[in-house]
């Protein structure tokens, strides 16, 4: 069984039994608002992708996702939108 660690604001981790309860609550909220339910894995994937898209260092995301190897975290970069218009060379700053 895969054990997912969900880190809360108070730095505590959910145990697997509380993880199941959490997913039940998420399922209920999604049903109440008439949203399509997604799995916990989908939420993890979205979390990591959005963090990377917003410029969070990949090593920080690796730690938050509890990945042993950064190569696992790099998987999330394949779906990121390429925003080349916002990327500038450090040499551009030399022109004043």
Image (cartoon, grey):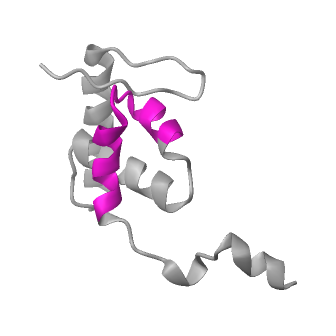
User: Residue drawn 32% across and 36% down?
Assistant: 25
77 over 84 or under it: above or below: above
Would you say 52 lies left or right of 76 here? right
Residue 18, percent across and down?
32, 19
Would you say 33 lies left or right of 38 here? right
User: Residue drawn 34% across and 42% down?
Assistant: 73
Residue 22, percent across and down?
33, 30
User: Residue drawn 33% across and 14% down?
Assistant: 15
Q: Quadrant of residue 90?
A: bottom right
* 18, 31: nearer the viewer: 18
User: Looking at the figure, which quarter contains the N terminus?
Assistant: top left
The answer to if 95 sits in the magenta stretch is no
Magenta-tinted stretch: 59-78
* 14, 52: nearer the viewer: 52
User: Residue drawn 51% across and 27% down?
Assistant: 8
Would you say 61 lies left or right of 30 here? right
């Amino acid at each position: 069984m895969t054990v997912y660690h969900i880190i809360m604001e108070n730095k505590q981790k959910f145990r697997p039994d509380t993880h199941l309860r959490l997913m039940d609550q998420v399922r209920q909220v999604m049903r109440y608002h008439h949203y399509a339910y997604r799995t916990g894995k989908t939420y993890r994937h979205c979390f990591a992708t959005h963090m990377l898209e917003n410029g969070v260092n990949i090593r920080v995301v690796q730690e938050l996702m509890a990945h042993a190897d950064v190569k696992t975290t790099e998987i999330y970069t394949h779906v990121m939108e390429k925003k080349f218009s916002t990327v500038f060379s450090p040499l551009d700053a030399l022109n004043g």
